[in-house]
Image: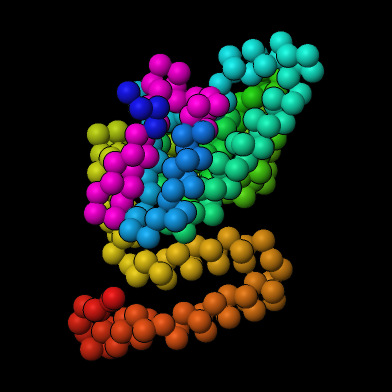
Amino acid sequence: MELLERHDSDGIAHLHMNAPERLNALSDEMMAALQAQIDALSEDRETRVVILSGAGKAFCAGHDLKQMQQARQSEDGGRGYFADLFARCTKVMTGLTRLPQPVIAQVHGIATAAGCQMVASCDLAVAAEGTRFGVNGVNIGLFCSTPMVALSRNIPRKKAFEMLTTGRFVPAEEAERMGLVNKVVPQENLEAATRELAETLKGKLSAAVKIGKSTFYDQIEMELDAAYAHAGQVMVENMLWRDTNEGIAAFLEKRPPDWS
């Protein structure tokens, strides 16, 4: 049994965390497996969309607390291990955001702490009814500082601070209203709804989606004038592409585009 399964189908790569007995916790091994796939996908020219899901009762319950406790037995009390752990986790999370392909989280059960961070780090998210989201480390005395980075870039500031300081679990419908997920569907429709969204994205000009994703994250951190200047230059380059010219011509001529 592979810890992280990958299934490829017609331009869509599905990464499936497969440690249900540990609620797909981000153990050292799981993060290594995720990083390996992120590295591979970053160079993959065939894959156009990525889906990320979890096996069993939960999407992901965050870091592996047992491994973290074991690390405290080292001579430095775990300081070196924890510094490396959170650096590796950050690389996984930012890697999802920096992949050229759109990444869709297919979420069910619970997504807590670093699991919630992972949902926030994906570009899109579809959740099953009954799913709960939390950054509840504060309940055990560990403030979710690194999950806060992704969460606070997804939802309103006061809502993020409330979740972080109260440890309250947020139901899927509230997560949708806040903007953490795009859509909530019945559990039995989760896989189909996620696949439908992936198929929609796959049908767009891949190069345009990739440059659009990169520009989206670049401009969102800029001041207004700088964001417009950057986005305008990207559009100039985009307009000069052969396939963009073909797409516009096809629209005007009311025919499907013949993209290369």
Depth order, front residue of 213/111: 213
Which image quadrant: the N terminus?
Answer: top left
Depth order, front residue of 213/176: 213
Q: Position of residue 173 (x, y in %)?
A: 44, 39
**Up-down: is 244 above or below 203?**
below
Q: Coloured how?
A: rainbow
Q: Position of residue 250 (x, y in %)?
A: 26, 84
Q: Is residue 182 left or right of residue 62?
A: left
Which image quadrant: the C terminus?
Answer: bottom left
Q: Position of residue 163 (x, y in %)?
A: 62, 33
**Up-down: is 94 above or below 30?**
below
Depth order, front residue of 195/97: 97
Toward the right, the furthest residue is: 76
Q: Is residue 133 left or right of residue 14?
A: right
169 falls in the magenta region: no
Tell me, yes or no, if residue 114 can be seen here. yes
Total marks shown come to: 0
- The magenta segment is 5-31
Toward the left, the furthest residue is: 255
Residue at image x 54%, y 54%?
Answer: 98
Residue at image x 47%, y 54%?
Answer: 42
Residue at image x 29%, y 41%?
Answer: 7
Q: Quadrant of the rendered structure where residue 147 is? A: top right
Q: Is residue 235 left or right of residue 162?
A: left
Residue at image x 68%, y 32%?
Answer: 84
Q: Is residue 215 left or right of residue 11?
A: right
Q: Quadrant of the rendered structure where residue 239 is? A: bottom left
Tell me, yes or no, if residue 132 can be seen here. no
